[in-house]
Image: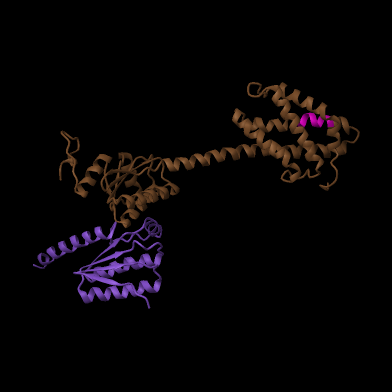
Chain colours: A brown, B purple
Amino acid sequence: MPASSPDPIAPMLDRRFDAILQDWIKRQTMAATARSDRIDEKELAGECREFLGAFRRGLASGESADIAKTGWSEITDFLSRISRSRAQKGFSPSETATFVFSLKEPLFGALRAEIANDPERLAVEVWRVTALLDKLGLYTTEVFLRSREEIILRQQKELLELSTPVVKLWEGILALPLVGTLDSARTQVVMESLLQRIVDTGSVIAIIDITGVPTVDTLVAQHLLKTVAATRLMGADCIISGIRPQIAQTIVHLGVDLSAVTTKASLADAFAAALERTGGSLTFGGAPHAGTSPA
Amino acid sequence: MERIPILKMGDLLLVTIQVDMHDQLALALQDDLTNRISAEHARGVLIDISSLEMVDSFIGRMISHIAAMARILDAETVVTGMRPSVAITLVELGLALEGVHTALNVERGMELLRRNVRTLARSAPRARR
C-alpha cells in the first residue's frame, strides 16, 4: 500500500472516535491488570483521549508504515512522556506497553462493524493496525529501557568518581584504599588520580590497599601490576596491602608473579614499612605491631 | 643539527630533555651520551624528562637502551620527573623500564644517584680484594 494514499482508518476513527474511546477506557478499567492504585480513572481517560487523538492525526498524515517519520512525532513524544511518568509511578514496562496494545480490541471491533461486508479488506486493515500498534507498544518499552540505562550510566559514573579516593597518610606517604571490583576503566581512573597525587604531594611511597576488592583474578592482578609499574616510573614506590588469605591463595594458584612488588597483609604493616623507608617512625606505648618501633 | 646538551657535575652527567623528542634527536643523544660517559669516566647519568609531554614506543625503548648502555659502561642511570600521562603511556606500551632507576624530581634523583655511586665506590675495592 503506497504510504501517501489517504488512510481509510482515519475517517472511521473520526466517525467512531467517542465510541472507541469509551470502549477502550471501559476495557482498561475492567481488565484484571488494571492498576487503579497507581493511576485514577480520570487521568487514564485523559491519557486515552490524548493518545487516540494523536493516533488519528498520525494516521491522517499518511505515513503509517514508519513511526520514526515526522507525522508520528506527536504520538511518540506523548508515549515517551507516558512511559517515563508511568515508570516513576511504578508501572512495569509490560503494563505500559499493554496500555497501547489494549487499544487493539476496541479498534478491531469498530473495524469489524465498519467493513463487515468485505472480509478481505478487513483482514488487511486489521493487520495494518496490529503492526502499527505493536510498533508503538514496543516504543514505550524502548523509552523505558533508555531512561533506565541513563540512570545506570549516571550512577556508574558517580561510583567511579566516588570509589577512588587517594589519601595522604603521612608526609611522603599516600594510601589508596580500593573498594569494589577493578576493571580496566576503573584502573585507568585509579592510576591517573594516584599518579597526579604523587606529583602534587611529592610522595615517595604509595600504599594500595585491596581489602575491599572482592576477587583478584589475572586481569585484576595485571591492572594492579600496571599501576605499580607506572608509580615506579614516576619515581615512587608502591606497597600492596590488605591481601586476604584467600586472595593470596588465588594469586599463587593463578601463577601471578607479585615478587617484584612489596606486599603486606594489612594496611598497618604497610604503613609501618613505608614509615621505615621514609625515615620516619611511630612510637606507641604497647603498639600491637612490632614494625612500628623506632627505626 | 640540534642536540640535547649534556652537563657534567663531578662524576655525574646531567641531561635535561626540554624539547619534543623526535627519533633523530634521540639517536643523537644516545650517541653523545655513551661517548661522554666513556670520555668523562662518569659514574652516574641523570635524565630529567619533566618537560616531556609525549612518548612513543621508540622514545621509551631509547630510554631503556640508554640505561642499559650506561650500565655496561659502569654508570647508573636515573630517570626523573616523569609525568603521569607519560608513565601511563609507557606502562600501556609494555615498557616498564626495568632496571632504570626513577625519582620524582631532579633533587631526589641526584640524592639517589650520589648514594648509589658512593656505595658502589665503597664496595668496588672490597670486591676486588
Q: Residue at x 24, y 41 (%)?
A: A269
Q: Which residues are magenta?
A: A103-110
Q: Position of residue B84 (x, y in %)?
A: 37, 55
User: Is A217 in the magenta?
Assistant: no
Q: Is residue A106 left or right of residue B76?
A: right
Q: Position of residue A114 (x, y in %)?
A: 88, 32
Name the quadrant containing residue A41: top right
User: Is A105 in the magenta?
Assistant: yes
Task: Give the mark count.
Answer: 0
Using the rendered image of the protein, determine whether residue A266 is visible from the camera's viewpoint. Answer: no
Q: Is residue A173 left or right of residue A159?
A: left
Name the quadrant containing residue A52: top right
Image quadrant holding the C terminus of chain B, namely: bottom left
Q: Is residue A246 above or below residue B69?
A: above
Q: Position of residue A201 (x, y in %)?
A: 31, 49
- By secondary structure, the bulk of the magenta-drawn segment is best described as helix
Q: Position of residue A7 (x, y in %)?
A: 84, 41
Q: Residue at x 52, y 39 (%)?
A: A152
Q: Residue at x 74, y 33 (%)?
A: A51
Q: Is residue B35 above or below residue B102?
A: below
Q: Is residue A45 left or right of residue A228?
A: right
